[in-house]
Amino acid sequence: MKKGVLVSVLLITLFFLIPVLFVGLPDKSEKTWTESGETPEDLEQKPLTQLEQEEREKSIPVFRSETETVEQMNLEEYVAGVVASEMPAEFEMEALKAQALTARTYAAKQMASPAEINLPEGALVTDTPMHQVYQSEEELKEKWGEDYEWKMDKVKEAVLATAGQVLTFEGQPITAAFFSTSNGYTENAEDYWQNSEPYLQSVESPWDKGSPRYENVTRIPVEELEQTLGVSLQNGEAGTILSRTDGNRVEELELGDQTFNGREIREKLELDSADFSITREGNNVIFSTKGWGHGVGMSQYGADGMAKEGKNYREIVKHYYKGVEISSLS
C-alpha cells in the first residue's frame, strides 16, 4: 500500500515538473543576431536591442527655414518627415522603405561629416531641397487634410521597418542622392558633379515611363534665352548638341559662339532634365526633355516601378547604388 502511494506521488510530481522543465529549456533554433550571423538586412524583422534603441534615439539639428530657428529632432521622426515630403505616400511600401533608407543615410553622412555650408547655431541640415525637404506633422496635417492619418501611418510603417539602417560603401555612409524621374537611365556622378563615386554610376531604369513628368516641352522666347545665357543666335539657329553622357543626357551643347554643359542649360533655363533635344519655331526655342531631376542615384518613380514588380527595398537600393551594403547606424 505504501509502495502504491509512493508511485502515485512520483507520477503526480513528474506530471507538473516535466512541462516546467521543457518550458525553461532554450530553443536551439533561436539565436541572437551575432550568433546567427544574420546581416543588417534582416534588422527590420528583429526586436530592437538596447543598442538599436539608443541609435533610434539619436537626434539631428535641423534649420527650419520658415521660422529661421534650429530644432533638435529625433532622427527617426526627422526621417519620417523627409519621406512624407519627398515621396508620394501613394507609392508602394517597398519604395517608401527605400526612400526612408536614403533619407536616414543622408542624415547619417551629415552627422559624421558635416558639409562645409554655413548654417546657424550648429544645424547640420536645412528643411529645403538644399539638403532634404522636411515637414513637421502639423505641416503635413495641413497639407494632406483628411488623408493625413492613412498617409502618415504608411510612412511611419516604412520608417520603422528600416529603423537603424543606413547605406554604406567600404564602411562609410554614402551620398544617397535621389531624384524624381529618369530618362531610362541614371547618371554617373562625375557627369553631373565634379567628383566620381563608384556607387553612383549609370544604371538602366526602365520603370519611369509612368511618371507624369517623364516627358515635357518647354518653349523659351529667343530674346529671353539670349539674355539668360549671354549668347546671340542667328535667324533659325537653335543650337547643336555636341555629345551626350552614359546616361544619355547632354554633355556639351553649342549655342551661338559659346559651349555649355547640359547641367548649365538645365539649371539656367529651369528645364526638367539635362536629357533634351532642341528645335526652333520662329521666335521660340523648343526644349523637349525626358526625365525630371539631376538623374544621379535612385529614381523615385523607378523605385516605385520596381516595387510594383515585386522587388523589395533591399533590391531597389542595391540596383541604384552599386556595391553598397545595408548596415547598422552604429
Image: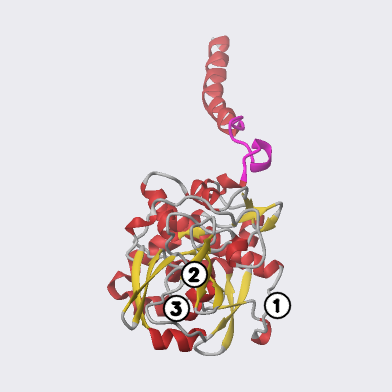
Which numbered marker is on residue 116?
Answer: 1
Judging by the rendered image, the residue that carries numbered circle 3 is 270
Q: Is residue 50 visible?
A: no
Sequence-wise first label, 1 or 3:
1
Residue 171, given in percent of the width and then of the height, sits at 71, 53
37 or 51, which is in the foreground? 37
Residue 10, given in percent of the width and then of the height, sits at 57, 18
Which numbered marker is on residue 89?
Answer: none
As drawn, is 101 to the left or to the right of 285? right
Colour approach in the figure:
secondary structure
Judging by the rendered image, the residue that carries numbered circle 2 is 82
Highlighted magenta segment, given as a residue range: 25-39
How would you classify the magenta stretch by its main secondary structure? loop
For the C terminus, give its image quadrant: bottom right
Instruction: Give the SS element for disc 2.
Output: helix
Amino acid marked by disc 2:
Val
Amino acid marked by disc 1:
Glu
